[in-house]
Image: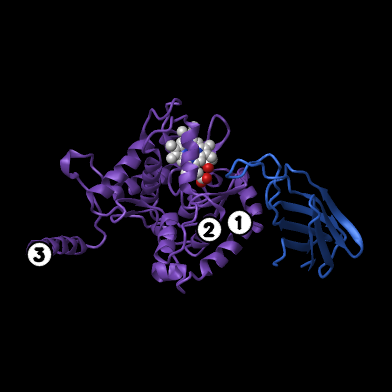
Chain colours: A purple, B blue
Amino acid sequence: MAARLAAAAVLAASLLSVAAAPAGQEAGGQAPGGQATVDPAADAAAMRAYFHTRFPALSLRDYADGPYALDAGMRKQLQDLMQFPPTTFALEDGAKRFAETFGDGATYATCFPGIGQGIAQDYPRFDAKRGGVETLAMAVNDCRAAHHAAPLPVDGEAMADLLAQIGKLSDGKPMAVTVPDDPHARAVYARGRAVFDDAKRGTVGMSCADCHVAGAGPGPDRATRAPALGITAGFPAYSTGAGRMLTAEARIAGCDRGLHVAPYAGMAADHLAIAYYLAAVSRGVPVAAPGVRP
Amino acid sequence: MASTIRVRAIAADGNVEVQSLIRHPMDSGFMKNDKGQIIPAHFIQTVTFETKGKIVFTAFWGPAISKDPYLKFSYQGGAKGDPLTISWTDNEGMSDTLTTKVA
């Protein structure tokens, strides 16, 4: 008993020391065990500087529009679409669902800080309890579980509607995903970055960065590739091609299929890690969800 | 039940520009549900826009149109305040109608 109390005191002290670290400090420098250096704040600054040099005319907000940011013709299409956005019904339903009362009288608003106004910019985040990345969809299902409601399918319409609404309630908030000073969180971030930069991904043997960093803009196939900066700020997004809303993870999985990556154990975790990495390096880009995409 | 129709009609320079969105599954009849069963075809067949007793736009749709279809067109000779009635019917005999005012 005494030993457990002592252990708890040590744990509390270590938590306190983390909490007492200077504000704004983030995981940085050499991780224990000789892991790769992880410095998300520096990566984010470098990413922003890179795109600022390449596309000086773009504002941070423009990046949230993904491929539309780089193509005047597509941008005009988007402006037309947004006069009567195809997300209209999803937002109407999402607002209703978000206001729903669970069996115990609670609502989604009770689960989230600030009654759920302005939370999307903090996701996906590292959740120590879960021991991994927590997406907004997972947080929504956790909220449901806490109030004895069955989980919603993560790729289903009800979830998409809710994510759209939560995104809307965070409209314009600068993305604020940071990597806590936790070896596991740093490892997930480093994994996301490594997979994104993996020069030999899939049988196509390209990296995500080949298209979304160096190759951002019109590609040889004439498809415009969104810049990596802010690439998830407009998600979930309604895909006019798919005729439904896609989460960032689903969109990432789509590009991975395009690279002909054979499914492997841990693939879904890698997609989450990429989403986490992309959100962390896109800090400052305003949330503009739900977006609309080709 | 809430209307399935959202519409905006704006008059400018003797033209009325209309945009509408209709909530409809537009099932093609080729998709399967979670249990592997075919989802029967269910789609809008006709949409009409009518103002002051005159049809200004008709669309005949088939199963290849996407879910919650969007339409944009303009017609001449309309003015602010005109009534505009939108109606659709589908292959299962369901329908909806809504009247709005040109803004």
Is residue A278 or residue A243 the one in the foreground?
Answer: A243
Q: Earlier in the sequence, mark 3 or mark 1?
A: 3
Q: Earlier in the sequence, mark 2 or mark 3?
A: 3
3D distance between C-alphas at marks 1 and 2 = 8 Å
Q: What residue type is labelled 3?
A: Met
Report the disc number at residue A164.
2
For the residue labelled by badge 3, is the local secondary structure a helix, a strand or a loop? Answer: loop
Mark 2: give few (<14), some (14-19) or many (20+) Cα within 10 Å. Answer: many
Position of A162 compared to A128: left or right? right
Residue at x-position 84% and y-position 53%: B57
| Residue B79: x %, y % from top left | 84, 66
Circle 3 chain: A
Q: Earlier in the sequence, mark 1 or mark 2?
A: 1
Circle 2 chain: A
Circle 1 chain: A
- Is A98 located above or below residue A135 in the figure? below
Is residue A214 or residue A196 the one in the foreground?
Answer: A196
Q: Which of marks 3 and 1 is in front?
A: 3
Residue on which the image places disc 3:
A1
Whether residue A272 is visible here, answered yes or no, is: yes
Residue at x-position 41% and y-position 53%: A135
Residue on which the image places disc 1:
A87
| Residue A15: x %, y % from top left | 19, 62
Mark 3: give few (<14), some (14-19) or many (20+) Cα within 10 Å. Answer: few
3D distance between C-alphas at marks 3 and 1 = 56 Å
Task: Say which quarter of the image contains residue A197.
Answer: top left
Q: Which amino acid does label 2 sit on?
A: Ala
| Residue A14: x %, y % from top left | 15, 60
